[in-house]
Amino acid sequence: AQSVAQPEDQVKVAEGNPLTVKCTYSVSGNPYLFWYVQYPNRGLQFLLKYITGDNLVKGSYGFEAEFNKSQTSFHLKKPSALVSDSALYFCAVRVALGSYIPTFGRGTSLIVHP
Amino acid sequence: DTGVSQNPRHKITKRGQNVTFRCDPISEHNRLYWYRQTLGQGPEFLTYFQNEAQLEKSRLLSDRFSAERPKGSFSTLEIQRTEQGDSAMYLCASSLDAGEADTQYFGPGTRLTVL
């Protein structure tokens, strides 16, 4: 079984401040982890993924995420938020060497205010 | 644009009618996935094709739902006898068979409203 929790429905930050969107996961085995962003009335856009190797993964638009195996977390971060980063963010997990079907979290709404 | 495309983008129908959605994946991608997304939720898996073979189906995919990918390129998702509970965004994604590095790329979705 695999599951994802995004504990915050909404995150608010001021433009220019660092942002963190939290994700924790549960899998039976090694995880593959993904972050996607969704703008209103649009599909999901791939940001970054962790498969293996360096725990700090860099992705699109200045986003990065840190894989922490002991805490079973994969938090999304950005050093300096932009108003245009305001969107829905989804974390997803699937188990290594298993099905190619990921399980998505419920999403976190990021609001960056000027 | 060489991304995943979906048509129509919006569909309004009356309860009991049949609807069909189309997905055109990224051209070299051999895997194609259908998801359903309702407000406040992440995408929920419906079904998955590798080339023309339908390899997995979710329990969410009732008998009223059918999906095809006849030539391993585009795919259609049909919902028969629609119900109000079918109202949702239907998302299609595709991926290249790259082993464990498989990453899905999503289309813009088809928003279905059943009146």
Image (cartoon, coloured by chain):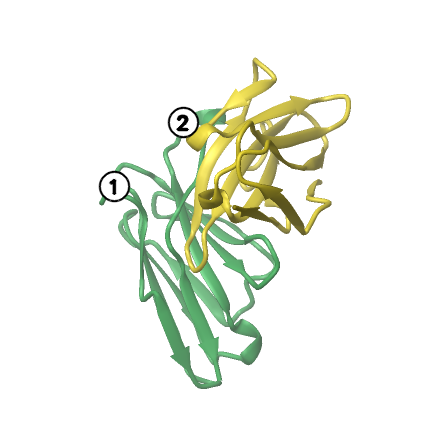
Chain colours: A yellow, B green
Q: Measured from the top left, where is residue A16 in percent x and y?
A: 53, 34
Q: Residue at x 77, y 21 (%)?
A: A70
Q: Residue at x 47, y 63 (%)?
A: B89
Q: Please say whether residue A100 is visible from this viewpoint.
A: no
Q: Measured from the top left, where is residue A46 in percent x and y?
A: 45, 38
At label 2, the amino acid type is: Ala
**Residue at which label 2 appears:** B98
In this view, A16 is above or below B80: above
**Residue at which label 1 appears:** B27
Q: Please say whether residue B6 is visible from this viewpoint.
A: yes
Q: How many marks?
A: 2
Quadrant in the picture for residue B40: bottom right
Q: Measured from the top left, where is residue A107 in percent x and y?
A: 61, 49
The secondary element bearing badge 1 is classed as loop
Q: Residue at x 47, y 85 (%)?
A: B16
In this view, B58 is above or below B21: above
Q: Dot 2 falls on which chain?
A: B
In front of the other: B81 or A104: A104
Q: Residue at x 30, y 47 (%)?
A: B72
The secondary element bearing badge 2 is classed as loop
Q: Dot 1 falls on which chain?
A: B
At label 1, the amino acid type is: Ser
